[in-house]
Every structure is written in structure tokens, then in C-alpha cells.
Image (cartoon, coloured by chain):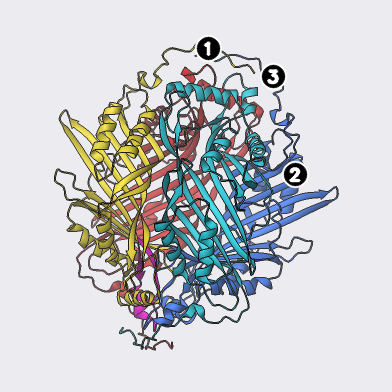
Chain colours: A blue, B cyan, C yellow, D red
């Protein structure tokens, strides 16, 4: 089949800019599953290269047929090349709003963050990855006012040892890997307290029966085994202890916390969940 | 090492029932990633066997150390053996609350639902799977009053053909598979309108450039190709058309709708998102 | 843009049937990620409804431009409606070869298989899902001869308790959920020994420190905890014990076995792998 | 319960070193799902930070009860800190064999590799991620001889436009994103030809209807749409064209190639698969 010919419109029509008559403004339109190399400030002052999987979108007025998808990638590419992330998502979102001529912007990024962890006795050190996320929104609520929300997500693998199993058994106690998944609503006012992933991980590890480690020699394994046994915790215990920690955590306005244990006696998982001061989601969704 | 011996406490201690002094009531404690065979009523009146992946949990009072995890599995097993699901999650949750002696219960289940779909011209028919979910909560708000929320999630694969690509190109237009992901807050009052997955799927398919099908012969493929081309839609268009449909959908109190297109010109996806009348989440979380 | 018109070729051209001049015969062409409801014979004689995710493809001669994708779905739909699976994949593949006029056919299906499991002391019973797969191929090696291969895959979650941790620690021992993943090359000659998933699961569970269960009451939990402790196993031990079992398993010609433990002291996993008498893959690939 | 006390064996017993009497040597024992930051040489001479998910294991003699899991992490950590990857996996595996005192070592790593891609007309540039893998084995076949195998895996998202749909339709043609997944058995002899991911990606993109891009402006979108339409390909066509390319690719001894299209007219996928000169897998498994 010979393809039909047509004179090229010059310049090409901006179809996205066409008028829309349905009268439906959309909360978000944008791009998803975008893999992007980014640079993140470490607590040490170093810069960590991360591979982020990003969603970025804007509010779409009811009059506009579509958003301009290429601009989100250009926005992210500029940050990939020139910027270091230090909770400065307000800047990213404000640039996005300007570039897309919108009154609200929303971003989510998932990434693995590496922290060097030392074995508790021998101090062998190796990198360990923690799945993390940032969810951020910026909404123009009046001509001069912007509302900004920033949520940090951190997943911390730990060990839990069952208090019931320990109590009722003549010897031993079942234990397992568990995941602590925290989402922290951060204070984003000027002069806000900096919140470091390194510190959040360390604080949450303390809430479990024992942290987990990338390298353990026999002396470490003995220590970890006995510490687990001395420190039994249900998933409910871990969530409660984490709640007490996060209520007082500087720079944290609210939080949700979920612990899910990959039970070593079941094929399914046990979980507990709690949240406090997590108010309107401001357009965030997963 | 010879394991140490210990006289068995008879009966075994109920460690979960121990008192807790931290003063933290938990929104949820329970089981996750439980695979369970269940029976679901079809619109036709038939019964479909589904494999559901279930979370089930309850509110935990601040005085109790832990919940009783085995009871959730027993609860689900009874429903696996004896019940047919017909949006009757209030019963399931009420039984769970009673069994666990709690004032709130929460459930989420994900499953694939099969619907026979006919090719548009030749009418060849084959089953096609739609990823679905139910999220339900039941909360005792006073001695005599229970608040019930039920959300149906349906994912519908469809095709979108890009209006911009069609307009600016001399011939052809890029198109791709997209997913419409709807979450519907259902009316759960007595004499509520029944909402069928079959109808939701059919209504949402109409919002895309074209449905997708399990079997297409050449006459069907010609039809589908031309219908896509005649009916270009951005992800934004699909969300808007779905919004107009869901606002008027009988039995639906509120909704969120997301469309994500697996762009055939990019390695990443385009998406649009909207929601209306989705109020407090009543303890639901993913 | 008004779409260009073209007279429809009547009947529509069979483009797949066009000649190809590159001289490259393809090992496989077909469909993937097809969800299909199927019926599987249980050891008890009952029929289990499963949701299978299926790949089905055929050898493509170097002279043919393409295969006919719709026929695979029609083939699977007929089996979905009319047949019960009892290792009878030779029939499925022979029908596929005939329907597609090809000299070889290949199939893979993944599904969850439910088995009722009883708690070891209280005998509470509940369904538990085991991820399973079948990989089958049928190849015409001469005018009268067909070569058939069938591989059954079974994943069995179990518990492992670390012998080193037990030995070196004053008390306790770390344990965790592990997955035994076996692939069994089945004898497909006439009068072959029937191999039941139920029996394979039971045999493999015996190779671990302890099985896992869907429901455990306190008496069961005590039993399971102490049995784990009395029966420490590295992943290497589980693979070795499984090897001894599978070498003698009636109806099994060869096998691979992998055990992966979700270590409760690390964020990563430990694994061991072995295989015997797994010869040419006969076109199977994952 | 007061935990039982036990004098610590000093030094702690090497339980892994205990004798084993079952007489079963294991093909592999080691670690899996290890996330590790590594450095990879780019074709440009630059260094790319990657996050790799690694498996690393060794052959285990029938006389040894277990391997020493911590040494694998120490091995990987050294490479994380000190080395740049340039297909030099023989060194990594030889160090592993020495460290673990084994006669064979096996490694697999999965990672995303970023390549800057330019839009075809406007030349806007942005990073795009390609899922890649290395599988490597080193086996001592005699006192002086080591057999080394190295397989590079590259996944390239592209577009395919259906030749049948174009031919039989009055206008338009369905197209979709597809994935080309190539596994290349690399020549590892001294003075082997260097194989760059950048070149493999570029060569495979040419086999599809059109590459996909991270950023496309309208002029680019017009170009891409029309190029797809001018260049229809079945998945079978892409595999055949890739086969012709890979047969002649310098430094490649054998290959498998799979193309899977996320059909825009179906909810399932179409695929084609071929392989040539992929001999004994030398202990590699997925």
C-alpha cells in the first residue's frame, strides 16, 4: 500500500493546546515509569548516584485538551545533569509548573539508597540498599501562595523474633526478616530541620528485634542470634516503638508506619499498620 | 548442643493477650499476602472460582500486646468453603470483628476476573482476565452504629491512538495498549444498586480509542485498526470520558480513575489521573 | 484529517502466509502472558480451577513470514472449556502443531495450586497456594516420530534454621522462610508413572527444617518452633536431601533443585542449586 | 524464660567446614538478590555508576557441609570500591574461587544502563535506561585450565507496526511497544573483541519498525509515526533481522533473541524466539 500524502502543516499543529469542551479539569497528567539517573546528597556530604523511577505530572485546566509530555522529560533531564537533590523538590515542582503553565505539580520517585553498614562485632563493612521514595506536590492556592507537601518513604529490612514462640517453646523461637515501611510527612517551611535517610534507617532499626547486616562473621552471627532472642517483638511491637520514635522525630509532621514480617512458620505475612497526622493527601496518589 | 528443657506451661500462655503499656492503639494488625480460593457471583448468575490475594486486619486496642493471627486465616477459610461473594463484605468484616473482639476491620483482595469477550466482527469468543480488587472497611462508630466502606477496583486494558500523531503525520498514527484503572466507592446502604464488574469493564472500554480482544481474525483486525484511527484519544481524553460516565454510574458514590499508556514511541508511559468524591479513606491503605 | 480510502481486498490478504526470503527458520513464534482459566485434576480425583499464565508457540519455517497468533488463543480456549489437565500436554501440543501446520510446539504455564494443609498438632486445616508450572514441548523428529518433553515446576515455601547459628550461640538460632524450587523432567512414555503435585510438595517439605502452615494455634507453634530447632539445615542441606529424594522419585527422569532462604540476619538471600540428568532443553526457555 | 547459658567455643566452630557424608557435590551455593553499587566502563571512556542486583556462588565439594556466605559479600564489596567493570569477570570469578577454595564460580548481575538518546529530528537529548545483565562462569577443568563463559543480556524497547494490519486496513495500522531481549555469548579469549552495550542497542534498534526515544517534539513525533508506518514488522521479522545482525557481530560466538510485543489490540503479548550456537550452559541458570 502506498501511504497517502498530505501537505505538512507548518508549523505543526499544537493538538494538545486545542480547546476541550467537556468541562473536566484533571488532577494530574504527565509521565510515569521514567528511569532517570539523579544525584542525591548524603549525610556525609558526599553525592550518591541513584537510579530513580519517576512520575511527574501537573494539573490540567478544563479548557486544555492535553499536557505536553516531552517537557517533563526535559525538566527531569536538566535535574539529572545539573542538580543535587537535598529535599529541594519545591524548586523542581515550581520549574515544572512554570514550564507546563499549570497551577499544581506532583512528583513521585522510587530509588534504592546505599548505606555502608558495619557488622556489630567484627566491624566488617559493606554497602546495603534501602528502597526509598519521595512524593512531593506543589499547589498554587492563591496568586501569591504555594502549598508544598513532601513525603519521604524508607523501607528498612530487619529481623523480628516472635515473643509468643519464645514463651511457649522449650527452646528456640521462630524469627524472620521483616520490612519496616515508613512514610514521613516532612516539614517544608523555611529553615526546616534536615531529615537524613541514614538517621531514619538507624532509628527504625532500633525498633526491631535486631537489624540485618550485609556481612556477618561468626562472632557477629552469634551476637545477632542472641540479640534477636533477647529482644522478641511482634510486628505490633515494632510499629508501636516506631510510633514513639516518629512522634518526636525533628522535622517530621506526620507519619505512617507499616511492618510486614515474612513469617518463617507461614507462607503468608503478618503486618501491623499505624499512622498519625497524615492529613489531606494534596493530590498524592500511588 | 543439647537444647535446654523447660516444663510446658499448661495451658500455653496467651502472649498476644498480655497487657501493653505504651499506650499506642494501632489502626491495623493482621495478615497479608494470603492466597485464598474464593467464589464470586457473576452477572450471569454463575459462580466464578477466583484466586484472591488477601489482606485482613483489625484495629488493636492500646491495652493489647498483639492480635491473634490464626483467626484471620480461619475466617477466610470459612468463606473459601461456604460463601459466595456478592459485595457482601460487611458480613465478612463483622464476623472478623467479632472473632477478634475489635472495633474495626479492614480487608483488601486482589484477583483476576475472567470475562468472555467476542471479536467485534467474527464473534470468536475467548476468556480475558481483568485485574480487580475489593477494599472494604467496617468501623464501629458507636455502640449501635457501624460505618462501612467498599471500594471496587477494576483494571481494563484498552488501546489509545494519539490525536497529535494522527494530526501532524502524513499517514499512520502511533497507538498502544493502555490500562484504565478505576476505583469506585460503592453505595453500601440497604437496597443498594448492584454494581457488576462486567458492566464497569464495558462502560470503561467505550472511553478508549478501541477495546482490546483475546481473539481477532483478519476481519476483526481491520475493524479494530480503523476504529482506533477514527477515534483518537489522549490519556487525558480517556480519563475525561470515564469521569463523565462514572459521575452518573448507579451505585457509585465517588471514584478515582487513572489511565496509563504504554507509549509505542517512548520507553516510559503517559498517564492522567482524576478523582471525585473520594473522601476519608476510613483506614484503607494499600 | 480525512482518512484515505482504499478498496478492501476481498478476501483479506493472508500477510502471515507471505513468502520470506531471509532463510531464517525460527525456533518459536506465538503468544505470551495469556491468562486462561483451566481445570486440573487433583490427586483426590477432584477438579481444581486454576488461573494459568500461558505461553504457547510453534516452530516457524524459513519460508513463512509469520505465524497465526489467533489460533493459539482458540486452541487454549477449547482446552479451557472442554478439557481437564492430567499431564496430557502431548495432546495439547499435537493439536497446536496441526492447527498451525508446524513441526514443533512449545508451551509454558504458571499457576498457583491450592492444597489443604493441616496444622501438625491441632489439625486446623486451610488452603495454601503453591506456585507451579508446566513446560512442555513436542517436536517432530521424523515423519512418524514425535519427541515429547514435560517439566513440572513446584515451589514449596518452608523454614530453614541455621546450623551454624545454633552451634555457636548460647541460645536461639536464626531461622527464616525459604523457597524450594524444583523442576522435574517427567517420564512421558506410555504407562508413565503419574506424578502428583501433592506428593512432590510433601516430599520436598520433609527436606527442610520444618514445613510452613497456613494456620497454627499455640500448640502447633510450639511444635513447629521446636522441630525447626531440632532440625537445623543450611540451604545446602536442603538441596542435598532433596537430591537424594528426587533421584529415586518414580516418574522423574531428571531434575533441578534450588533453595533460596530469605535470611533473617541479612537483607539478601542465601541459595544452593543442583541439577542432574537435565539434558538438552528441547526448545524450552523461560 | 531465662535463656540457657553455654560456654562459648573459642574460637567458634566452623560449622560450614564440617564433613558431609551424603556424597552430593552441589553445582552452586552462594548469595542472591544482593544489591551492590558498581562502576561500569562506558564506550565513551566514562564511568557509569550502576546499581546491580547480583547472584554469586561456587561449586561445593561433596565433602563440605556448607559454603561461607560472608565471603561473597566481601568479594563484591571490594569490587564495588576498587574496580571498574570492563567484561573483566574472569578476574572476579577467579578471586571468588580462590577465596572460597572452589573449582567453579558463577555470577549473574542485572542492572539498568543509561544511554543518552537524541530525538531523530530536533536532537533533544535525554538519558534512557536499558535493562542489562551479565552471566559469567569460570570452571577449573584441569589443574592448569580454566573454562570461562560470559553472556551479555540487553533489553531494548522498540516499536513494531503490524504488516498485516497495515495491509488489510483502509487506513492506519496497529503498532505497539515491544521488547527485544538479546543474550550474547561473548568471545572471552585473549585479545577478544570488546562488545559495547551502546553498539548492541543501536544495532538491535535498527531491526524494529522504529526505535523509541525519551524526548520527542512534534517534528520528531511526525518522523517516528511515519517511519513506523513505512517499516512494518512482525515480531518474527524483528527476530530474523536481529539474527542476521548477530550472526556477524564481532566478538559474539552465539546468541538467543526474543522479541515480545505488548500488542495494542490484545491484552496479551506476541513473541518470537530464536537462538544459535548457544551450547552447554556451563552451570549458568536463571
Is residue B275 within the magenta segment?
A: no
Q: Quadrant of residue B243?
A: top right
User: In the current view of this chain or complex, which residue is farthest to the right?
Assistant: A144
* Residue B3, position as x, y percentages in the image: 33, 84
Query: Which class describes the residues within 10 Å of circle 2: few (<14), some (14-19), or many (20+)?
Result: many
Is residue C160 within the magenta segment?
A: yes
Q: Are marks 1 and 3 in contact (CB under 8 Å)?
A: no
Q: Is residue C49 above or below residue D36?
A: above
How many marks the image carries: the answer is 3
Chain where mark 3 sits: A
Q: Are marks 2 and 3 in contact (CB under 8 Å)?
A: no
Q: Which residues are magenta?
A: C158-179
Q: CA distance from mark 1 to mark 3?
A: 24 Å
* Residue C111, position as x, y percentages in the image: 36, 49
Q: Which labelled disc corresponds to residue C6?
A: 1
Chain where mark 1 sits: C
Amino acid at each position: 500500500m502506498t501511504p497517502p500524502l498530505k501537505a505538512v502543516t507548518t508549523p505543526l499543529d499544537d493538538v494538545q493546546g486545542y480547546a476541550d469542551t467537556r468541562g473536566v479539569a484533571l488532577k494530574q497528567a504527565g509521565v510515569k515509569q521514567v528511569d532517570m539517573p539523579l544525584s542525591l546528597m548524603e549525610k556525609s556530604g558526599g553525592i550518591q548516584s541513584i537510579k530513580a523511577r519517576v512520575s511527574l505530572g501537573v494539573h490540567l485546566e478544563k479548557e486544555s485538551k492535553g499536557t505536553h509530555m516531552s517537557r517533563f522529560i526535559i525538566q527531569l533531564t536538566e535535574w539529572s545533569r545539573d542538580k543535587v537533590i537535598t529535599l529541594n523538590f519545591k524548586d523542581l515542582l515550581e520549574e515544572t509548573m512554570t514550564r507546563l503553565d499549570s497551577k499544581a505539580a506532583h512528583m513521585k520517585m522510587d530509588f534504592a539508597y546505599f548505606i555502608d553498614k558495619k557488622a556489630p562485632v567484627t566491624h566488617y563493612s559493606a554497602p546495603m540498599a534501602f528502597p526509598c521514595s519521595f512524593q512531593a506536590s506543589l499547589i498554587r492556592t492563591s496568586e501569591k501562595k504555594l502549598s508544598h507537601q513532601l513525603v519521604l518513604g524508607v523501607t528498612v529490612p530487619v529481623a523480628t523474633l516472635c515473643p509468643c514462640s519464645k514463651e511457649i517453646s522449650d527452646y528456640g523461637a521462630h524469627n524472620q526478616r521483616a520490612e519496616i515501611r515508613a512514610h514521613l510527612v516532612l516539614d517544608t517551611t523555611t529553615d526546616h530541620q534536615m531529615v537524613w535517610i541514614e538517621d531514619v534507617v538507624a532509628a527504625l532499626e532500633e525498633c526491631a528485634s535486631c537489624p540485618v547486616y550485609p556481612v556477618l562473621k561468626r562472632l557477629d552471627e552469634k551476637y545477632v542470634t542472641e540479640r534477636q532472642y533477647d529482644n522478641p517483638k511482634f510486628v505490633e511491637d515494632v510499629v508501636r516503638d516506631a510510633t514513639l520514635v516518629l512522634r518526636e522525630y525533628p522535622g517530621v509532621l506526620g507519619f505512617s508506619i507499616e511492618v510486614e514480617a515474612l513469617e518463617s512458620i507461614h507462607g503468608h505475612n503478618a503486618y501491623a499498620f499505624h499512622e498519625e497526622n497524615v492529613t489531606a493527601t494534596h493530590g498524592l496518589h500511588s
